[in-house]
Image (spheres, rainbow, N blue to C red):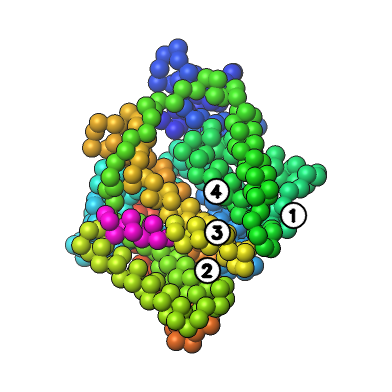
Amino acid sequence: MEFGFLNAVLRSPVMPPYDPFFSDGYINYYYYGYMLFSIPIKLTGIAPAIAYNLALATLFGLVLAGASSLVAHLTGRLRYGLLAAVLVGVVGNLGGVLAVGWSRGLNSVLQAWRSGDPAGFGGRLGDWFIGPSRIVDGTINEFPYFSFLYADLHPHLIALPLTLLAIALALLLYEQHRRVPLVFDGPAYLLYGTAALVLGTLAVTNSWDFPTYTLLTGAAMLGAAWRAQRTGPAWGGLAAAGVLAAVLAIGGMVLYTPFFDHFYAMVSGIGVQLGGTTLPEYLVLYGIFLAFVLPFVIGVVVRLLWGFWLRPTPTLRTVGVFSVAGLLLLIGIAGFTRPVLGLQLLLLALIGIGAILFFNRRLASSTWFLLLLVATAASVSLGIEYVYIRDHLVGSDFYRMNTVFKFGLQIWVLLALVAAAPCRSCYVVWGASDSARGLVRQPRRRVCWCCWQCRSSPAWSTHWRARLAKPATALR
């Protein structure tokens, strides 16, 4: 499908391009990502069969560079930016180690290695590499490295660098409005125009990304307006920021009016469900990130309760610490007894903490923005447990497949960015207590351990994919 759409865009003299699978029709799909790549392909004259693979390599480089630059800017350290590139684009989930869903785990790999000649190892693995992308029953749980390895030049993959750009622009808008509530000058107009253009581009490249990153941009602007005023409510600034965020979102859509004039979404609304993902499944998907995110969030809360924010009495500090411990114990018990409820409690806790700290004016700007990313990821995670997009799969066992698939990638990117950044700030967050410092005494070993656990899927999947490679033939 992807190669057919790319060829159609390259060969069509007008837009929308012709449909290669429907005679006398045009592509009723978010094809704009293919159009973006068609421009350099036509300029360079590279054969589409070769350009397809170069496009994949280009996207991979853009994803790694975008994640690295964003976290390096947040932390001020290049090494944490490099860690973000690894977490976003290189590691896999814990399905490469654990046998969950379709995944056969690491034991299957070891069995294949021991059962014959090493030269036939890739063949004995068979379809093992698909397993980690099918953890939750009836859904798709791809992660970026799997999509790149599978050479899936699909809109969800093409949009990945754009989503990182949208997060970076949200950060820039937050930093600008944090200093000055509302600015209208040359650089500000350029920033607003770029943000509107990127949001609109997401809407026509991978429509699933538009609502999440529009809300993230709006929340960043609202938070900046609130934090720009030192005391008291900032109703005027909040109203102005809200209006400006709405203008950016609507303006982005208006920029692509010609696309929407010929586009008809093949969905029939929103369906309601009562959850389906369990806490163990969620930990298999995103556990490597939560190993860093949860200590960071808990550390921020404990530090604030310990006197950094309200300077409470010893009694209030004790109540706060025991409340946090009790909440964690409750989530743990629910995770074993009622796994679906356990996940929902965890997500609600993260959302609640994010909502409360949203109005905290004393948090460092980078910490506040990281907490916003955590709350956004938790909100998306909880949202897809209750609602789904009614597409052509409605009525089947796979009715929420695309919803979990497309929004799951957003969760992956948001949590991966947050997981990379707190490695340094954990020292600051937990540093007030010598007894708690052991949690982050050797963060480099924690990083290495988590990446080692998640290397399984990328490592063995890459080996299997390499076994399928055919010798290149000379081009005539």
**Residue type marked 2:** Pro
Residue 462 picture location, percent across and down: 38, 54
Give the spatial CA distance, label 2 vs label 4.
Answer: 20 Å
**Residue type marked 3:** Phe
Of the two numbered discs 3 and 1 on the same chain, state the one appearing first in sequence.
1
Q: Secondary structure under badge 4?
A: helix
Question: Would you place residue 95 above or below residue 134 in this image?
Answer: below
Of the two numbered discs 2 and 1 on the same chain, state the one appearing first in sequence.
1
**Residue type marked 1:** Val
Question: Would you place residue 272 above or below residue 126 in this image?
Answer: above
Give the spatial CA distance, label 3 vs label 2.
Answer: 18 Å
Magenta segment, principal secondary structure? helix
Residue 367 visible: yes
Residue tagged by mark 2? Answer: 422
Q: Which mark's residue is nearer the viewer, 3 or 2?
A: 3
Q: Is residue 430 left or right of residue 278?
A: right
**Label 4 environment density (alpha carbons within 10 Å; few <14, some 14–19, many ≥20):** many
358 vs 62, nearest the viewer: 358
Give the spatial CA distance, label 4 vs label 1.
Answer: 20 Å
Which portion, as a residue range, is magenta?
A: 340-350
Residue drawn 32% across the image and 38% down it:
272
Q: Secondary structure under badge 2?
A: helix
Residue tagged by mark 1? Answer: 180
**Label 1 environment density (alpha carbons within 10 Å; few <14, some 14–19, many ≥20):** few
Q: Secondary structure under badge 1?
A: loop
Residue tagged by mark 4? Answer: 216
